[in-house]
Image (tube, helix red, strand yellow):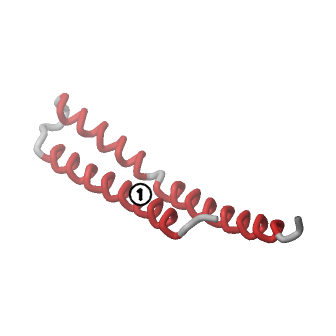
Amino acid sequence: MVRFQEIAGIALTLVGFIIVVSIGADVVDGIQDTQTSGTAAFNVSEDGLEGLTTFGSYSPTLATVFIAGIILTVIGGIFFMGRQGSY
């Protein structure tokens, strides 16, 4: 059975992921504002920001997988615990 500490740890990892990506995107956006448009530095920061945006767009999918995993684990745990008494 999944313990609360394990669920909390996974949830905090997801929150940490979102915070790190958000802060990283903010930093890259701030750096890009100081660059001249069309320069190599501007293009690199633009690509970096696009990559962070794409990476961050997976947050809802990760959250869905996380919740589905918890639900399946709980259902599996209930099923397994119910079967233990019949042996």
Give the residue at x 55% y 59%: 66
Query: How many circles with numbers are drawn on the protein?
Result: 1
Residue 8 percent location from the top left of the image: 46, 67
Q: Is residue 61 left or right of residue 34?
A: right
Q: Quadrant of the C terminus?
A: bottom right
Residue extending farthest top: 40
Q: For mark 1, give the secondary structure.
A: helix
Residue 43 percent location from the top left of the image: 24, 33
Q: Which residue is under mark 1? A: 13
Give the residue at x 59% y 64%: 2
Depth check, front residue: 81 or 28: 81
Q: In the rendered image of this protein, does residue 41 appear above or below residue 49?
A: above
Residue extending farthest right: 86
Indicate the quadrant where residue 51 lies: top left
Q: Quadrant of the N terminus?
A: bottom right
Give the residue at x 35% y 45%: 52
Q: Is residue 29 left or right of residue 54?
A: left
Residue extending farthest front: 87
Q: Is residue 21 left or right of residue 14?
A: left
Crowding at mark 1 (Cα within 10 Å: few <14, some 14-19, many 20+): few
Residue 40 percent location from the top left of the image: 19, 28
Depth check, front residue: 59 or 16: 16
Give the residue at x 26% y 50%: 24
Residue 81 percent location from the top left of the image: 76, 69
Q: Which three-letter amino acid code belongs to the residue tagged 1?
A: Thr
Q: In the rendered image of this protein, does residue 50 appear above or below residue 82?
A: above
